[in-house]
Image: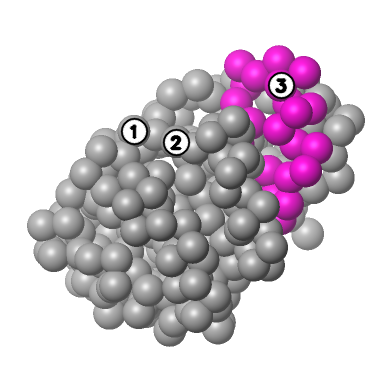
Amino acid sequence: MKNLVAYITTGFPSLDFTVDAALALGEAGVDTLELGMPFSDPVADGPVIEAANLKALQNGFKLEHLFDASAKIAPHIDTLWMGYFNPFYHRGMKNFIAEAKRAGVNGFIIPDLPLEEARPYKPMVEEAGLSLIDFIAPTDTEQRIKEIVTDAKKFIYLVAYAGITGAGKSEDLQPVIHNIKQYSNTPVYVGFGVDQNTAKEKAKGVDGVIVGSAFVKVLLDNSITDSQKITKISAIAKEIKEKINS
């Protein structure tokens, strides 16, 4: 069974919505939830997630909101915090680890923290029983892939193309997947540009997919109510989970 990881932006359109949407996605078959930490300069994210980040910040998002919402979500679905390194640096990794443990969150996804810069923090995270997810890009050499994935835990985040989320580009990932699986038995999940239309193709040769913009687009749709948004993202999750496992 291939897994589905879903990203939503914490606090958009509201914190109560975030909790309700997360629990609904779990019921719809999502295996792991990425709770996005709104940030003013989300360099790896495309315009859809960037817009949701900005709106959450305008609504007054604070890190304490992430911690409180996570405590209601994490007991029910495997939860990771996805955020850029700036907040981790300023508040301190030890504080983030303590808050994650308190809430039941299982780890962190920090896209702007490359292998070399992650080295001081990864042992600290793993000693606490949490995971710091490793990224592989299609531009990485075989030697670089070996170096990154040798000690990878939980899953390896394979970026589907060089660029930003939601761009919908396509690259042949099979050589990269082959190189990863030579050096690691850790599951490989592919993200960036995965939606209902692309999920089945992108899931070839990997153990799961990561979907963000497809869900956040629905959250940005002001023409439907919050309950309709939850119904719609649940249907998308069910469709993607079915397609990647058919």
Task: List x then y, in percent, for residue 12.
Answer: 24, 63
153 is within the stretch colored magenta = yes
What residue did someone put label 3 on? Answer: 144
Task: List x then y, in percent, for residue 5.
Answer: 57, 56
Secondary element at image label 1:
loop
Image marks 1 and 3: residues in contact by CB distance under 8 Å: no
Secondary element at image label 2:
loop
Compare marks 3 and 2 and give the one earlier in the sequence. Answer: 2
Q: Which residues are magenta?
A: 135-157
Nearer-the-camera pick, 208 or 15: 15
Q: CA distance from mark 1 to mark 2?
A: 8 Å
Image marks 1 and 2: residues in contact by CB distance under 8 Å: yes
User: Which label was assigned to residue 198?
Assistant: none
What residue did someone put label 1 on? Answer: 43
What residue did someone put label 2 on? Answer: 112
Task: Give the quarter of the figure containing the N terminus.
Answer: bottom right
Compare marks 1 and 2 and give the one earlier in the sequence. Answer: 1
How many other residues sit within 10 Å of disc 3, few (<14), some (14-19) or many (≥20)?
A: some
Place residue 198 in its image quadrant.
top right
Residue at 17%, 56% (x, y): give it.
Answer: 57
Q: The disc labelled 3 sits on which kind of residue?
A: Arg
- Location of residue 117 with respect to 64 vertically, above or below: above
Residue at 75%, 28% (x, y): give it.
Answer: 147
Task: List x then y, in percent, for residue 201.
Answer: 65, 35
